[in-house]
Image (cartoon, rainbow, N blue to C red):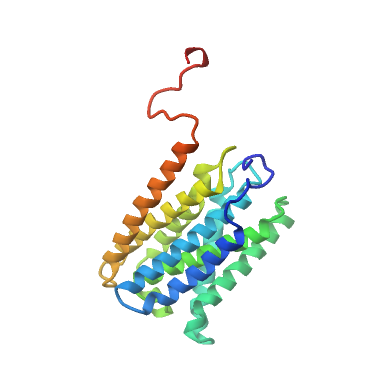
Amino acid sequence: MSVAAGGPAGAAIPESRLMALGIIGGLGGIYASTVNPVIGPVFASLGAVCAIIWGADAIRRVASYGLGTGVPSIGYMSVSIGIVGVVAGLASVFTLPALAAPVVGLILAMILGVVVAVLGKKIVKMKIPILEKCTAEISGAAALSVLGFSAAIAGSYTMQAVLTSVIATGFIGLLFILNTMAIQHPFNACLGPNENQTRTLKLAASTGFISMAIAGLLGIGLNPGWWLVSLVGALCWVVAFKSFVSASFEEAASVKWSGLWPKEEEQ
Protein backbone atom coordinates (compact mmCIF):
# COMPACT_ATOMS: atom_id res chain seq x y z
CA MET A 1 0.00 0.00 0.00
CA SER A 2 1.32 3.36 -0.97
CA VAL A 3 1.01 5.08 2.41
CA ALA A 4 2.34 2.25 4.52
CA ALA A 5 5.90 3.56 4.30
CA GLY A 6 6.89 0.39 2.51
CA GLY A 7 7.09 1.52 -1.09
CA PRO A 8 4.64 1.96 -3.95
CA ALA A 9 1.80 -0.36 -4.89
CA GLY A 10 2.07 -2.46 -8.03
CA ALA A 11 2.63 -0.67 -11.33
CA ALA A 12 0.66 -1.34 -14.50
CA ILE A 13 3.31 0.45 -16.58
CA PRO A 14 7.00 -0.37 -15.98
CA GLU A 15 9.09 2.57 -14.80
CA SER A 16 11.54 1.97 -17.66
CA ARG A 17 8.80 2.68 -20.21
CA LEU A 18 7.76 5.86 -18.46
CA MET A 19 11.39 6.98 -18.33
CA ALA A 20 11.67 6.32 -22.07
CA LEU A 21 8.46 8.28 -22.63
CA GLY A 22 9.78 11.21 -20.61
CA ILE A 23 13.28 11.34 -22.10
CA ILE A 24 12.54 10.46 -25.72
CA GLY A 25 9.24 12.32 -25.83
CA GLY A 26 10.63 15.30 -23.93
CA LEU A 27 13.79 15.70 -26.00
CA GLY A 28 11.94 14.94 -29.24
CA GLY A 29 9.38 17.63 -28.53
CA ILE A 30 12.03 20.18 -27.61
CA TYR A 31 14.05 19.54 -30.77
CA ALA A 32 10.87 19.68 -32.87
CA SER A 33 10.03 23.14 -31.50
CA THR A 34 11.85 24.80 -34.39
CA VAL A 35 10.37 22.80 -37.28
CA ASN A 36 7.51 25.27 -37.80
CA PRO A 37 6.50 28.52 -36.06
CA VAL A 38 2.96 27.25 -35.42
CA ILE A 39 3.29 23.48 -35.01
CA GLY A 40 6.71 23.54 -33.33
CA PRO A 41 5.52 24.98 -29.99
CA VAL A 42 2.81 22.29 -29.84
CA PHE A 43 5.45 19.58 -30.18
CA ALA A 44 7.55 21.22 -27.47
CA SER A 45 4.56 21.35 -25.11
CA LEU A 46 3.62 17.73 -25.77
CA GLY A 47 7.20 16.80 -24.95
CA ALA A 48 6.86 18.67 -21.67
CA VAL A 49 3.69 16.71 -20.86
CA CYS A 50 5.56 13.44 -21.49
CA ALA A 51 8.23 14.56 -19.02
CA ILE A 52 5.58 15.53 -16.45
CA ILE A 53 4.03 12.06 -16.59
CA TRP A 54 7.48 10.52 -16.07
CA GLY A 55 8.18 12.83 -13.15
CA ALA A 56 4.79 12.14 -11.55
CA ASP A 57 5.50 8.42 -11.59
CA ALA A 58 8.92 8.97 -9.99
CA ILE A 59 7.24 11.10 -7.28
CA ARG A 60 4.80 8.25 -6.74
CA ARG A 61 7.58 5.74 -6.21
CA VAL A 62 9.77 7.77 -3.85
CA ALA A 63 6.99 9.40 -1.81
CA SER A 64 5.34 6.04 -1.16
CA TYR A 65 8.01 5.37 1.47
CA GLY A 66 6.37 7.85 3.85
CA LEU A 67 3.00 9.31 4.70
CA GLY A 68 2.99 11.62 1.69
CA THR A 69 3.92 14.76 3.63
CA GLY A 70 7.14 15.15 1.64
CA VAL A 71 5.49 15.14 -1.79
CA PRO A 72 5.45 18.95 -2.25
CA SER A 73 8.93 19.25 -0.75
CA ILE A 74 10.66 16.89 -3.15
CA GLY A 75 8.59 18.39 -5.97
CA TYR A 76 9.75 21.96 -5.40
CA MET A 77 13.31 20.86 -4.66
CA SER A 78 13.58 18.76 -7.81
CA VAL A 79 12.08 21.39 -10.11
CA SER A 80 14.58 23.89 -8.68
CA ILE A 81 17.35 21.45 -9.53
CA GLY A 82 15.86 20.97 -12.99
CA ILE A 83 15.83 24.71 -13.69
CA VAL A 84 19.47 25.00 -12.60
CA GLY A 85 20.31 22.14 -14.96
CA VAL A 86 18.39 23.75 -17.83
CA VAL A 87 20.09 27.14 -17.44
CA ALA A 88 23.51 25.49 -17.19
CA GLY A 89 22.71 23.37 -20.23
CA LEU A 90 21.66 26.39 -22.27
CA ALA A 91 24.86 28.15 -21.21
CA SER A 92 26.89 25.24 -22.59
CA VAL A 93 26.50 26.76 -26.08
CA PHE A 94 29.68 28.71 -25.35
CA THR A 95 31.66 25.46 -25.47
CA LEU A 96 29.32 22.95 -27.16
CA PRO A 97 26.98 22.99 -30.19
CA ALA A 98 23.53 24.45 -29.48
CA LEU A 99 22.03 21.09 -30.42
CA ALA A 100 23.58 19.57 -27.30
CA ALA A 101 22.02 22.06 -24.85
CA PRO A 102 18.84 20.09 -23.99
CA VAL A 103 20.79 16.86 -23.44
CA VAL A 104 23.42 18.63 -21.34
CA GLY A 105 20.68 20.27 -19.27
CA LEU A 106 19.03 16.88 -18.67
CA ILE A 107 22.30 15.23 -17.65
CA LEU A 108 23.33 18.06 -15.32
CA ALA A 109 19.91 18.11 -13.66
CA MET A 110 20.02 14.37 -13.01
CA ILE A 111 23.57 14.53 -11.65
CA LEU A 112 22.61 17.37 -9.30
CA GLY A 113 19.58 15.34 -8.24
CA VAL A 114 21.80 12.42 -7.24
CA VAL A 115 24.16 14.72 -5.31
CA VAL A 116 21.30 16.30 -3.36
CA ALA A 117 19.78 12.88 -2.63
CA VAL A 118 23.11 11.56 -1.33
CA LEU A 119 23.38 14.58 0.97
CA GLY A 120 19.84 13.90 2.14
CA LYS A 121 20.71 10.33 3.07
CA LYS A 122 24.09 11.10 4.62
CA ILE A 123 23.26 14.30 6.51
CA VAL A 124 19.49 14.28 7.03
CA LYS A 125 19.53 10.48 7.45
CA MET A 126 16.62 9.85 5.09
CA LYS A 127 16.11 6.10 4.89
CA ILE A 128 14.63 5.78 1.42
CA PRO A 129 16.43 3.13 -0.67
CA ILE A 130 15.43 4.61 -4.04
CA LEU A 131 15.98 8.26 -3.10
CA GLU A 132 18.96 8.84 -5.41
CA LYS A 133 17.34 7.21 -8.43
CA CYS A 134 13.98 8.92 -8.05
CA THR A 135 15.39 12.35 -7.23
CA ALA A 136 17.52 12.12 -10.37
CA GLU A 137 14.46 11.13 -12.40
CA ILE A 138 12.26 13.90 -11.01
CA SER A 139 15.00 16.49 -11.59
CA GLY A 140 15.50 15.26 -15.15
CA ALA A 141 11.76 15.29 -15.81
CA ALA A 142 11.54 18.80 -14.37
CA ALA A 143 14.37 19.98 -16.61
CA LEU A 144 12.70 18.63 -19.76
CA SER A 145 9.24 19.91 -18.82
CA VAL A 146 10.51 23.40 -18.01
CA LEU A 147 12.59 23.56 -21.19
CA GLY A 148 9.69 22.16 -23.23
CA PHE A 149 7.29 24.85 -22.06
CA SER A 150 10.03 27.46 -22.40
CA ALA A 151 10.55 26.44 -26.02
CA ALA A 152 6.79 26.59 -26.57
CA ILE A 153 6.69 30.15 -25.24
CA ALA A 154 9.84 31.35 -26.99
CA GLY A 155 9.40 29.35 -30.19
CA SER A 156 12.91 27.91 -29.80
CA TYR A 157 15.08 26.15 -27.23
CA THR A 158 18.15 28.31 -27.87
CA MET A 159 19.68 30.27 -25.02
CA GLN A 160 18.95 33.68 -26.53
CA ALA A 161 15.29 32.88 -27.19
CA VAL A 162 14.67 31.42 -23.72
CA LEU A 163 16.62 34.21 -22.01
CA THR A 164 14.62 36.91 -23.80
CA SER A 165 11.13 35.40 -23.74
CA VAL A 166 11.10 33.32 -20.55
CA ILE A 167 13.78 34.39 -18.07
CA ALA A 168 13.83 38.16 -18.68
CA THR A 169 10.03 38.32 -18.65
CA GLY A 170 9.82 36.50 -15.32
CA PHE A 171 7.84 33.62 -16.81
CA ILE A 172 10.49 31.25 -15.47
CA GLY A 173 9.08 31.87 -11.97
CA LEU A 174 5.60 30.92 -13.12
CA LEU A 175 6.93 27.81 -14.85
CA PHE A 176 8.65 26.84 -11.58
CA ILE A 177 5.31 26.81 -9.75
CA LEU A 178 3.36 25.42 -12.70
CA ASN A 179 5.65 22.47 -13.33
CA THR A 180 6.04 21.68 -9.65
CA MET A 181 2.29 21.46 -9.21
CA ALA A 182 1.89 19.42 -12.39
CA ILE A 183 4.48 16.86 -11.25
CA GLN A 184 3.74 16.58 -7.53
CA HIS A 185 -0.04 17.07 -7.43
CA PRO A 186 -1.13 13.74 -8.99
CA PHE A 187 0.27 11.51 -6.24
CA ASN A 188 -0.47 14.09 -3.58
CA ALA A 189 -4.14 13.96 -4.61
CA CYS A 190 -4.38 10.19 -5.12
CA LEU A 191 -2.25 8.81 -2.28
CA GLY A 192 -3.92 6.41 0.09
CA PRO A 193 -4.38 2.67 0.64
CA ASN A 194 -6.21 2.28 -2.68
CA GLU A 195 -3.92 4.45 -4.81
CA ASN A 196 -2.94 2.88 -8.12
CA GLN A 197 -0.58 3.95 -10.85
CA THR A 198 -3.09 4.13 -13.68
CA ARG A 199 -5.41 6.58 -11.95
CA THR A 200 -2.49 8.68 -10.69
CA LEU A 201 -0.98 8.95 -14.16
CA LYS A 202 -4.33 9.91 -15.67
CA LEU A 203 -4.34 12.84 -13.29
CA ALA A 204 -0.70 13.55 -14.25
CA ALA A 205 -1.76 13.77 -17.89
CA SER A 206 -4.52 16.15 -16.82
CA THR A 207 -2.17 18.45 -14.89
CA GLY A 208 0.32 18.33 -17.74
CA PHE A 209 -2.23 19.37 -20.35
CA ILE A 210 -3.73 22.19 -18.28
CA SER A 211 -0.18 23.46 -17.79
CA MET A 212 0.27 23.26 -21.55
CA ALA A 213 -2.83 25.42 -22.06
CA ILE A 214 -1.44 28.03 -19.66
CA ALA A 215 1.99 27.93 -21.31
CA GLY A 216 0.28 28.69 -24.61
CA LEU A 217 -1.27 31.83 -23.15
CA LEU A 218 2.16 32.96 -21.96
CA GLY A 219 3.28 32.86 -25.57
CA ILE A 220 0.85 35.58 -26.68
CA GLY A 221 2.86 38.15 -28.60
CA LEU A 222 5.96 35.95 -28.55
CA ASN A 223 5.17 33.27 -31.13
CA PRO A 224 2.36 32.75 -33.68
CA GLY A 225 1.53 29.25 -32.44
CA TRP A 226 0.42 30.21 -28.93
CA TRP A 227 -3.29 29.74 -29.71
CA LEU A 228 -2.78 26.20 -31.01
CA VAL A 229 -0.77 25.26 -27.92
CA SER A 230 -3.59 26.48 -25.67
CA LEU A 231 -6.29 24.87 -27.80
CA VAL A 232 -4.63 21.44 -27.94
CA GLY A 233 -3.77 21.64 -24.24
CA ALA A 234 -7.34 22.53 -23.26
CA LEU A 235 -8.93 19.82 -25.40
CA CYS A 236 -6.53 17.15 -24.16
CA TRP A 237 -7.10 18.32 -20.58
CA VAL A 238 -10.85 17.72 -20.94
CA VAL A 239 -10.23 14.18 -22.22
CA ALA A 240 -7.62 13.37 -19.55
CA PHE A 241 -9.62 14.82 -16.67
CA LYS A 242 -12.80 12.99 -17.71
CA SER A 243 -10.78 9.77 -17.82
CA PHE A 244 -9.43 10.45 -14.33
CA VAL A 245 -12.88 11.21 -12.90
CA SER A 246 -14.32 8.07 -14.51
CA ALA A 247 -11.53 5.97 -13.01
CA SER A 248 -12.17 7.53 -9.61
CA PHE A 249 -15.90 6.72 -9.80
CA GLU A 250 -15.22 3.15 -10.88
CA GLU A 251 -12.90 2.49 -7.95
CA ALA A 252 -14.84 4.38 -5.27
CA ALA A 253 -17.01 2.39 -2.87
CA SER A 254 -19.60 5.17 -3.11
CA VAL A 255 -19.82 8.81 -4.18
CA LYS A 256 -21.42 11.65 -2.23
CA TRP A 257 -21.39 15.14 -3.71
CA SER A 258 -22.25 17.13 -0.59
CA GLY A 259 -23.11 16.81 3.08
CA LEU A 260 -21.77 14.41 5.69
CA TRP A 261 -21.46 10.67 5.24
CA PRO A 262 -24.30 8.80 7.04
CA LYS A 263 -23.48 7.12 10.33
CA GLU A 264 -23.19 3.36 10.25
CA GLU A 265 -26.46 2.85 12.15
CA GLU A 266 -28.27 5.11 9.67
CA GLN A 267 -27.26 3.08 6.65
Give me the residue at 44% from left, 77% from top: 31
Viewer-nearest residue: 227 or 217: 227
Viewer-nearest residue: 9 or 215: 9
Give me the residue at 46% from left, 42% from top: 247
Q: Position of residue 123 (x, y in %)?
A: 72, 55
151 left or right of 143 in image: left
Viewport quadrant of the N terminus? top right
55 left or right of 39 in image: right
Q: Quadrant of residue 75?
A: bottom right
Give me the residue at 49% from left, 63% from top: 51
Q: Can see residue 82?
A: no
Is 155 above or below relative to 7? below
Q: Can see residue 62?
A: yes
Q: Position of residue 210 (x, y in %)?
A: 37, 55
Give me the residue at 28% from left, 70% from top: 225
Is 237 above or below relative to 35? above
Q: Position of residue 182 (x, y in %)?
A: 45, 54
Outermost residue toward the top? 265
Q: Position of residue 151 (x, y in %)?
A: 39, 72
